[in-house]
Image (spheres, helix red, strand yellow):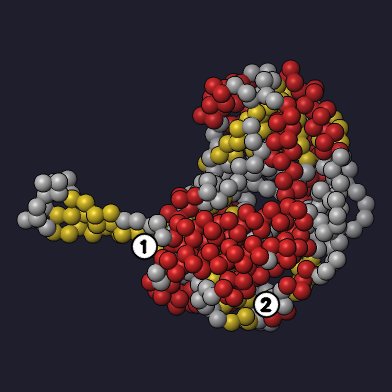
Amino acid sequence: MSDPMNVLAPEHRRLRIGDAWRDAAGGATFAVEDPATGKTIAEVADAEVEDGLAALDAATTAMAEWAATPPRKRSELLTATYRALTERSEEVARLITLEMGKPLAEARAEVAYGAEFFRWFAEEAVRVEGRYNTAPGGGYRILTVPKPVGPCVFVTPWNFPLAMGARKIAPALAAGCTTITKPAAQTPLTMLLLARIMEEVGVPPGVVNIVTTKRSGKVVSALLADRRTRKLSFTGSTEVGRVLLRQAADNVLRTSMELGGNAALIVCADADLDVAIDGAMVAKMRNIGESCIAANRIYVEEPVREEFTARFAKRMGALSVGHGLDDGVDVGPLIDDVSVAKIDELVADAVERGARVLVGGERPDGPGHFYPPTVLADVPEDARMLGEEIFGPVAPIISFTSDDEVMAKANDTEHGLVGYVFTRDLQRALRFAEGLETGMIGINRGLISDPSAPFGGVKQSGIGKEGSHEGILEYLDVMYAAIDLPNATPSGS
């Protein structure tokens, strides 16, 4: 196989700040590894606080000119980014697989998904509107003008190295904001490649800055403490999100938070089981189960529990595990050994409490951070995995006997990102849609992510929306002007 690292030259494995690719202030680097082998694939710059503030300097310097750039020009640059990603899909996908582990087919799908954010927000860039109207009491006019919020700080996760950055950078640039992105230390290479692509298509210096670091806490804290930062968007765990929200409060920053999930997938007895099993496979196993919207708890109504469980376990057991760049692989490695150890612990806890392992359930020997697709039946309510985000290829199945019962169980969590329901009864589907305490729901569908739809949760799963028209609003402040016009002819006369 060709070396995916060839697409990112050594000089572009450094910090992207302003118009330069530069080393970290102290010259430090850190290793990025292939999770399938545990071997180092690259060294990237390990930024210090000084570097983060230099990126903010660059973003602040570029802000006025970028905000004043005509929306059509910003739109054209976003469209050019979409086209470049589409044309270079294969090389970007191979890099994603190499540093994150997902199978190549899924990496290609991520490139298509991530690129689509640039196309969508290229279209939104020219549709930002204000209004002009007569005040209800007459005598003056009301003018509202949307304005970019200012320099934005983005903290992105490792599970979708391209898409999570694209979902933030695209609307910010469309709105006229400049950006500093701190990608996850496990997967910084894809975001560096995106910065290189955006540089090549003509995005001006200082608009997109990338700061790679293993000192995330110190660097991000310094950025949030600086009054020039006006927006924070974070995708990651609820625990870290709470910390960042406290820090953002000091400067009253605009925030968007896409946090943890504990999705319930509900299969009703009247569901089309072929559709339900296909949907459950996608909802559970997309991205190796390492997704905030992964099905974390699978509730199956008692009359179809036995058939669904047997068929679902057979499908899970047939998945092939291996290096994501190898042909025919369905399931790649988890991101690191910590993730494998956590999942192993959750499975052991469930089995100790009475769950039965139908497929998988044992960590394999050998290199890499692998865990097999696993199905557990008869999972008791006190099993830890029903209350914690599994973030891996493990599916606990629990039976239910009534809609009220399963609705209460599904809602018994601090999280509220997404839920899934499979039923052929429209009224029943609508009752679940209205009753589940989630920001999103898939009805007879295991995949709900779409750049044209508003993505986000409720409760402790987040604040704000990403994607759709709502996504660009997160990067705009509305300025209101009261214009005295006492003798004007009333509108409509």
For mark 2, give the secondary structure: helix
Farthest-out residue, left: 487
Q: Earlier in the sequence, mark 1 or mark 2?
A: 2
Image coordinates for residue 365, horizontal then vertical, percent: 93, 52
Is there any visible trace of residue 435 in the rendered image? Answer: no
In depth, the one of 222 and 286 nearer the eye is: 286
Which numbered marker is on residue 147? 1
Image coordinates for residue 356, horizontal then vertical, percent: 85, 30
Q: Residue at x 81, y 49 (%)?
A: 331
Which numbered marker is on residue 410? none
Q: Is residue 8 left or right of residue 252?
A: right
Circle count: 2
Amino acid under disc 1: Lys
Q: Residue at x 31, y 56 (%)?
A: 130
Q: Quadrant of the N terminus?
A: bottom right
Q: Residues within 10 Å of mark 1 (few under 14, many from 20)?
A: some
Q: Quadrant of residue 432?
A: top right
Amino acid under disc 2: His
Is there any visible trace of residue 340 in the rendered image? Answer: yes
In depth, the one of 461 and 270 nearer the eye is: 270
Q: Residue at x 68, y 42 (%)?
A: 294
Residue 411, compared with residue 132, is above or below; it is above
Q: Quadrant of residue 191?
A: bottom right
Q: CA distance from mark 1 to mark 2?
A: 33 Å
Image coordinates for residue 85, horizontal then vertical, percent: 63, 64
- Give the residue number, with chain letter if any, for mark 2: 12
For mark 1, give the secondary structure: strand
Image coordinates for residue 194, horizontal then vertical, percent: 63, 68
